[in-house]
Image (cartoon, rainbow, N blue to C red):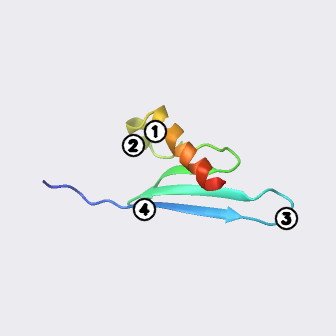
């Protein structure tokens, strides 16, 4: 086969301090292109590119949100 190689990376950031609750974000990248975003305010993993919105349905995003919530706790 002629399978292409790709990279998948998630960057998780927690910011604490002040009187606000800690802010937690997760940004997903494929080949250094952002494709998903989660933060502790929205509490939802959302698609950030057309190609992922067109190729993954609500079930995928529900599962990704649950993974993010688990990581957030």
| Residue corresponding to mark 4 | 32
Could you give the CA–CA distance between mark 2 and mark 1, rounded to whole angstroms? Answer: 14 Å
- Cα separation, mark 3 vs mark 1, equals 35 Å
Compare marks 2 and 4 and give the one earlier in the sequence. 4
C-alpha distance separating marks 4 and 1:
21 Å
- The CA span between labels 3 and 2 is 38 Å
Q: At 64% across and 54% down in the image, what residue appears?
A: 72
* Label 1 crowd bin: few (<14), some (14–19), many (20+), radius 10 Å: few
Identify the mark nearer the N-term, 4 or 3.
Answer: 3
Q: Secondary structure at mark 3?
A: loop
Q: Is residue 45 visible?
A: no
Give the residue at the far top of this rendering.
Answer: 58
Q: In this view, which residue lies farthest toward the bottom?
A: 17
Give above or below for 68 relative to 19.
above
* Residue for badge 1: 60
Which marked residue is nearer to the observer: mark 3 or mark 2? 3
Image depth: mark 4 or mark 3 in front: 3
Dot 2 corresponds to which residue? 51
Nearer to us: label 2 or label 1: 1
Residue 33 percent coordinates (x, y)? 43, 57
**Element type where label 1 sits in the image:** helix
Q: Residue at x 23, y 57 (%)?
A: 4
Relative to 72, residue 58 above or below? above
């Amino acid at each position: 086969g002629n399978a292409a190689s790709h990279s998948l990376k998630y960057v998780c950031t927690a910011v604490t301090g002040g009187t606000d609750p800690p802010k937690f974000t997760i940004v997903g990248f494929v080949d250094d292109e952002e494709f998903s975003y989660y933060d502790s305010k929205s509490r939802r993993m959302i698609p950030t590119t057309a190609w992922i919105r067109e190729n993954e349905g609500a079930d995928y995003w529900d599962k990704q949100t649950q993974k993010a919530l688990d990581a957030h706790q």
